[in-house]
Amino acid sequence: MYAIVRAGGRQEKVSVDDVLNIDRVSEEAGSTVSWEPLLIVDDGKVVSDSSELSGYKVTAEVLGEAKGPKINMIKYKNKTGYKKRLGHRQKYTRVRVTGIAK
C-alpha cells in the first residue's frame, strides 16, 4: 500500500516506514505531521476520488532536520574584473511515515 501526498510543494510517493526529506516545517523532533493523500494504491485498487480520499490520513513522525548538498554558483564577466562566488544549502525536515489509515 502506498500513497501520493503533497508535502512542501512537491508530490511524494510514500508507504509505511519510509524516511524522506521534505521542505522545512516548523514542527519539533518527535512530533507528528499529517497530510491528506492525493492518490492511494492498495493491492491494485486505486482510490483517487476526492470524496473517498477525504477519510484517509497519512501521518508521519518528525525525526529532525537535515541539509541538502552544497550548490556553488559563480558569476563572471569577461574583461571587467567582475567575479562573484555564491553558495546555497537547502534545509529539509526528515520524517518517517508511520501510517496510512482511513
Image: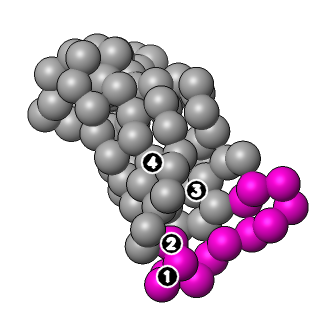
Q: Tell whether position 48 is magenta.
A: yes
Snapshot quadrant of residue 95: top left
| Disc number placed over residue 29 in the picture, else none | none
Question: Which one is earlier in the sequence, the residue at label 3 or at label 1?
Answer: 3
| Disc number placed over residue 53 in the picture, else none | 2
Question: Which one is earlier in the sequence, the residue at label 1 or at label 4?
Answer: 1
Q: Nearer the viewer, mark 2 or mark 3?
A: 2
The answer for how far apart the CA atoms under marks 2 and 4 are is: 11 Å
Q: Determine contact: label 2, label 4, CB under 8 Å.
A: no
Question: Which one is earlier in the sequence, the residue at label 2 or at label 3?
Answer: 3
Residue 50 spot, x, y in % from top left: 49, 82
Q: Determine contact: label 1, label 4, CB under 8 Å.
A: no
Q: Nearer the viewer, residue 98 or 63?
A: 98
Residue 27 spot, x, y in % from top left: 16, 30
Does residue 26 appear to the left or right of 31 in the view shown? left
**Looking at the image, which residue is at 46% across and 25% down?**
96
Q: Determine contact: label 3, label 1, CB under 8 Å.
A: no
Does residue 25 appear to the left or right of 101 in the view shown? left
Residue 84 appears in the figure: no
| Disc number placed over residue 4 in the picture, else none | 3
Magenta region, residue range: 41-53
Q: Residue furthest right?
A: 44
**Looking at the image, which residue is at 86% across and 61% down?**
44
Residue 61 spot, x, y in % from top left: 35, 26
Q: Nearer the viewer, residue 52 or 18?
A: 52
Q: Nearer the viewer, mark 3 or mark 1?
A: 1
The answer for how far apart the CA atoms under marks 2 and 3 are is: 11 Å
| Residue carrying label 1 | 50
Q: Amino acid at mark 3?
A: Ile
How dense is the environment of label 4, judged by Cα within 10 Å: few (below 14), some, or many (20 and up)? many
| Secondary element at tag 2 | helix
